[in-house]
Amino acid sequence: MQQLLVPIYDFLGCETPNSWVEQAKQSEQLNALLIDHCNCELKAAQTAIFMIRKYAIDKTSANLLKDWAKPYEDFVYQQDRNVAAFLARDIKKNDITNELVVSNNLVISTDLMNKMVRLVKEEFHHFEQVLQIMTSRGIDYSNIRAGRYAKQLMTHVRTHEPATIIDKLIIGAFIEARSCERFAKIAPHLDDELAKFYISLLRSEARHYQDYLTLAQNVAGTDISERIDYFREKERELILSVDGEFRFHSGVPAV
């Protein structure tokens, strides 16, 4: 675990404040933490699907991605959701890479598609795992409002290509790296089941951050360290500033 975290800490501009950890480990916050984590897994998958559809595949293939995501989105957005039926459904194969046709919008379209499809597969699986843990503990799923974190980072994305995709990929790297860091921060304070689960997520989250960063570098074709530094500072500000909502990626808890 420590070996995985070394590059994560080098990449991030700060560690999670102890005040967030203190709040996260309180038993009364566990429900909110798990619900937001569950939603974050789905949002990560949706973001990756958007990247694939926009930059990597043709329009016909985009419909395959929509069909792949539909059961998850139907579950989240419907009012009379049935958790047991969702978890017990027949799951279609989760790797549709061979069925997608690359559009060659980018030099790295094929690499982007392969990496993002793998990420979507894993995030969908994590969504189901968190949902299963919640169900076993009697915690009802809720499509709660997302915190400020990702939304605020996205306000800094440039509006011309390829700068737009480069910025979005860099943001993706920071979100995944912060997730990895927080899994490690809170795992020691949770019960055995949750601790083991969060530690098990470290490897995939660490790879996701590296995949996003590699794709950003390859799209740019030049040094992007200045842009990474820019988002490192913006992300650091969000993590270290007071935040009125407690979320998985929230900042310093308000007193």
Image: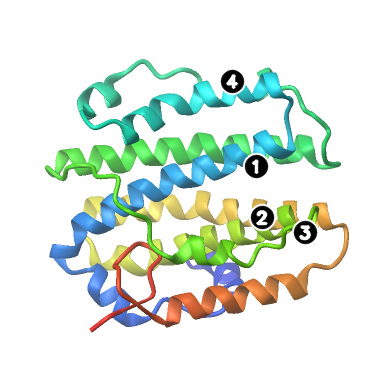
Q: Secondary structure at mark 4?
A: helix
Name the spot of residue 100 as percent of width and height, x first: 69, 22
Q: Which mark is residue 163?
A: 3
Is disc 2 surrounded by few (<14), some (14 to 19) or many (20+) residues within 10 Å? many
Q: Tell me if residue 134 comes above or below residue 147 in the rendering.
A: above
Q: CA distance from mark 2 to mark 4?
A: 23 Å
Image point (27%, 52%), residue name = 34
Of label 3 and label 1, which has the lower sequence position? 1
Q: Which mark is residue 51?
A: 1
Quarter of the figure with the C terminus: bottom left
Q: Secondary structure at mark 2?
A: helix
Tell me which amino acid carries mark 3: Ala
Residue 113 shows in this picture: yes
Tell me which amino acid carries mark 2: Leu
Q: Quickly name the residue at label 4.
A: 64
Q: CA distance from mark 3 to mark 1?
A: 14 Å
Along the viewing direction, whichever of 224 and 55 lies nearer the viewer? 55
Of label 4 and label 1, which has the lower sequence position? 1
Along the viewing direction, whichever of 89 and 163 lies nearer the viewer? 163
Q: Tell me if residue 210 comes above or below residue 24 in the rendering.
A: above
Q: Quickly name the residue at label 2.
A: 169
Image point (16%, 39%), residue name = 136
Image point (66%, 53%), residue name = 212
Name the spot of residue 187 as percent of width and height, x first: 31, 63
Of label 2 and label 4, which has the lower sequence position? 4
Horizontal relation, residue 254 to residue 220: left or right:
left
Of label 2 and label 1, which has the lower sequence position? 1
Name the spot of residue 244 as percent of width and height, x first: 30, 74
Residue 98 shows in this picture: no
Q: CA distance from mark 3 to mark 4?
A: 28 Å
Of label 3 and label 4, which has the lower sequence position? 4
